[in-house]
Each structure stands twice: as structure tokens, then as C-alpha cells.
Amino acid sequence: MPSTVLEPTAIPIVDFACFGDGTSPEAIEIGRQLVKACREVGFAYFCNTGIPQAEVESMFEWSRALFSLPIETKLLAPHPKEGRNHRGYSGVGREQASQMVFDPAELAAIRKQTPDFKESFDVGRDDCPRISNMWLPEQVLPGFRDAASAFFNTCFRFEMEKLLPALSLGLELPGGGEFLGKYHQEADNQLRLLHYPAAPAEVFARGEKGRTGAHTDFALGTILFQDDVGGLEVESPRGSGNFVAALPMPGTVVFNIGDFLMRWSNDTLKSTLHRVRAPQNDGTGMVKERFSIPYFMSADRDILIDCLPGCWGEDRPKMYEPVTAGAYIDMRLDATY
């Protein structure tokens, strides 16, 4: 398949066309480019991933069908009260992004602010022994369960066959491209369908509604599929308070590292703030609805994670105590709901 030709952007582009089985000099160079992007920006566009575009487009169609259902129908698969049980449907205003805040009083104050104006549906691996998926009755949306599960598996294959090997190569971890994959055997990941409803532009201008405030992701990293509406913005350079648009680019996915990988790498790689803003008024007086599909990747929950080899030494002490991915992610999710 020919490589995708892309225009220059402030966010680096990593092309997986020549990655192959991850053992060639070309694969090593792709890994270096990926880690460079993670060090300098924390975000990258991926092209030629091998994820079929037809499957991506089909998943967006399923998402549109899902969110067009009546609210009482969507609530047949309700997200549990606990944030850590991240499955099923969450209605508009249920979730509020918070950035590294865990004090109950502070969280309560944050939730009194404008809630995130979005709705979501979360899916995990089908045979997870810890937490079950929350599915709508099959007759409500026939075929949705099979399609969502298949897309989850497609994303997991890309993670295991290309993304984790590339990161391992770029970080020069022991064992070549196999190191990180050993910590991600259980597919303890999350596929999220997101819908930002249309609304009058004036309510966004007055601050009555927001899409998603500035935040970092929790886990190893995220691959994100966008529609053509736009709205994703990334802090650049990191720490500046200035945000640049991560414009939709056909045939690509957006990747960003998460806080857990930052911790695991002893801040060698740093997660970057990003947000979703409502597009400017196009003259109609309405802000268009937006759909996106993030796939959040996590290390196996019960493995104790210490600092990655090569990311610490006598002149660079470890900054963080060992922690399991499960304990860390649950803490962050419970602060969100």
C-alpha cells in the first residue's frame, strides 16, 4: 500500500509504512522518530498503521447510530457509579475532567463548574474477569456489540505489533522491540465512543457549556480517531499555556503518551496537556456536533511497575515509587466521576 502524503504540521508525523516485523533498520528509525516526538511534543500523527480505514469509518457510523438513540434507550447500558468501572453509557455532564486533583472537597468544587458537554460509551475486552462490558440489548442496535469488539481487537493488534515495539526500540530497552509488550498481555484497554452534541454558539461563548478542559491522559498512551469537525488542541511547547490545533488529517490517527508512561520513564517522556474546544461560529449560530474514538492503552493491572531501564542512574535518581497500573488508573478514574 502506498504511503500517505501529508502536509507539514506542528505535531510530528510518524509513518509506519516500513515498520515490517520490527527488526529492520527502518523499524529502528521509526522507533527513534516516535520517541523523539514523545520527548519533544508528547503527541504525534501516525500514518500507514495498517488499521483499515473502512473499519474506522464503519465504527464512526456505529457511533452515530448509538448516540442518536433516545436517552432512555442508551441508559439501558449505564456506566456504573464508580469511575474505575469504566464501561457503558455516560450521559452529558456525567464526567468532568480534572487534572491531578484528588481531594474530595476540591473535586466537588470542580464538578460545580461547567461540566464537560459530551456523552460517551466505553468498551473493554470481552472476557475481562474483573469488569464486564455493559451492552445494550442486541435488538436495540443489532451488530453493534460485534463491531465494537472487533474494532477493539484491531486497535490492540496495532498496539502489540507496531506501537509497543516501536516505543521499545526508540527507548533502546532490553530485548529490542519485545520489552513493553510483556507488560501488556491482558489487553486491559478501553475503547471509548465520544459524542459532543451540537449547541448554539452563544452558550459556548458565554461559558455555559464546554467540551473538554485541558488535561492529560492517565495510562500508557492513547490513539485517537477524529471526524472532520476538529476541536482538539495540544499545548505547544509543553508548559507554555499556548495551544495549537491538532487538525483532522485523513488516513491518520493521533497518538499521545499518558501520565503512567511518563512516570514509568522517570519523566524521560512527558505527557502533554490537551483539550477539546468548540469550533468558531461558522455563521449559522450553531456549533456542529463532533465525534471521536479514543483507544486508551494500559499496562497489565497487577504487575508492579518500576522505572524503565536506561531512564535512571546514579546521576538521575528514580522520581517515583513502584506502583501497579491498576492502582494508579483507578485513582485517576475515580477523580473524574
Image (cartoon, rainbow, N blue to C red):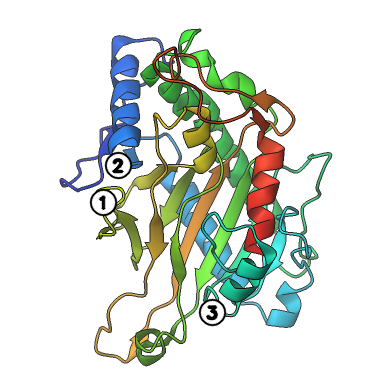
144 lies above or below 55: below
Q: Earlier in the sequence, mark 2 or mark 1?
A: 2
Q: Tell me the quarter of the image containing the N terminus.
A: top left
224 lies above or below 31: below
2 and 3 marks in contact (CB < 8 Å): no
**Residue 52 image-quadrant placement:** top left
- From the image, state whether disc 3 or disc 1 is nearer to you: 3
Between the residue at mark 2 and the residue at mark 1, the CA separation in whole angstroms equals 7 Å
Which residue is farthest right? 129
Task: Point out residue 308 in the picture as x, y percentages from the top left corner.
Answer: 51, 20
**Residue 45 image-quadrant placement:** top left
Q: Earlier in the sequence, mark 3 or mark 1?
A: 3
Q: Is disc 1 placed on a helix, strand or loop?
A: loop
Q: Is disc 3 placed on a helix, strand or loop?
A: loop
On residue 222, the disc is none
Residue 147: tell me if it is visible: no
Q: Earlier in the sequence, mark 2 or mark 3?
A: 2
Judging by the rendered image, the residue that carries numbered circle 2 is 41
Task: Point out residue 213 in the picture as x, y percentages from the top left corner.
Answer: 45, 67
Amino acid under label 3? Gln
Amino acid under label 2? Val
244 lies above or below 109: above
Judging by the rendered image, the residue that carries numbered circle 3 is 113
Between the residue at mark 3 and the residue at mark 1, the CA separation in whole angstroms equals 26 Å
Q: Residues within 10 Å of mark 1 (few under 14, many from 20)?
A: many
Name the residue: 60% across, 37% down.
298
3 and 1 marks in contact (CB < 8 Å): no
Q: Is residue 133 left or right of residue 5?
A: right
